[in-house]
Image (cartoon, rainbow, N blue to C red):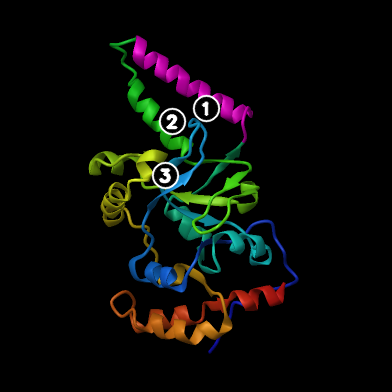
Amino acid sequence: MQRNIKPRKSKITLSANTLFHFTSSIDNLINILTNEFEPRYCLDQVCLFRERTAIPMVCFCDIPLSQIKDHIENYGRYAIGLSKDWGKRKGINPVLYSYPNSTLSITINSMGEALYKEDTTQTGKSFNVKSAAVLLIYTTLFTKPYEGVLIRENANPKTVRFYDEREWRYIPQITKFGELHLPLTLKEEDFKNKDLVLENQVKLASNSRLSFQPNDIRYLIVEKESEILNFVDRITDIKARYPIEDRKILHTRIMSIEHILDDF
């Protein structure tokens, strides 16, 4: 099998021309290839909110393969990498990193307080204060702490520097939430209601999938070399999603974490 994506030791950059989405299993990877990306409510910490908030999003990282060793330990050893040009066409945006009492955090919180005060004390304004407040909240969903505690399912919490992840984030356009009567965010206590979360995610996924074509894919990464042949067979079975010519393109994009780590 031809694999034309061997990493080069001689060229190490600070960012990649690829946006990687890492996941914990090969089944998740097959699901993405079959159904594309589906936004999911994920708990995260953003400016403006003191408590963690569930945000409907798909996350990517802008990390060269030479620097993924720590990242895969936190987010999984399977991945799909798509071109950054694809990401820009889809409106995927780098997050803004901040920390408590930084200029950015203070400014955002001050804006929120000013809009809240304006909304509760004055009426008859031509300026739509509520709309501005919603837009501010939406903007802050693209913020993330410089560092903090990473909480993952089936893993012990640990302090990490999120800034090193160089995260890019896809969140459906704000108009979608009004059209679908969906919450822009969920409080952590509401996020514990699995039925509520699933109901919202199903509705959002069916109307806000993040689509891609085989030519947008630069990498398909599995954990072990021994998994590649089976993975090829499973891609071949995705008949409804891609014609055979496109499935052959995907076969040339496959590599393993073992292969990557050996090269760096």
For this rendering, which residue is in front, 109 or 90?
Answer: 109
The reply to whether callout 2 and callout 1 are in contact (CB within 8 Å) is yes
253 lies left or right of 176: right
Circle 2 SS class: helix
**Would you identify the image quadrant in which residue 125 lies?**
top left
Q: Residue drawn 28% across and 42% down?
A: 182
Neighbour class for label 1 at 10 Å: few (<14), some, many (≥20)? Answer: some
Q: Which residues are magenta?
A: 99-121
Q: Main secondary structure of the magenta part?
A: helix
Name the amino acid, label 2: Leu
Name the residue furthest bottom.
Answer: 1
Q: Which of pointers 3 and 2 lies earlier in the amino acid sequence?
A: 3
Residue at label 3? 55
Q: Position of residue 226 (x, y in %)?
A: 55, 85
Residue at label 1? 108
Name the amino acid, label 1: Ile
Residue at label 2? 136
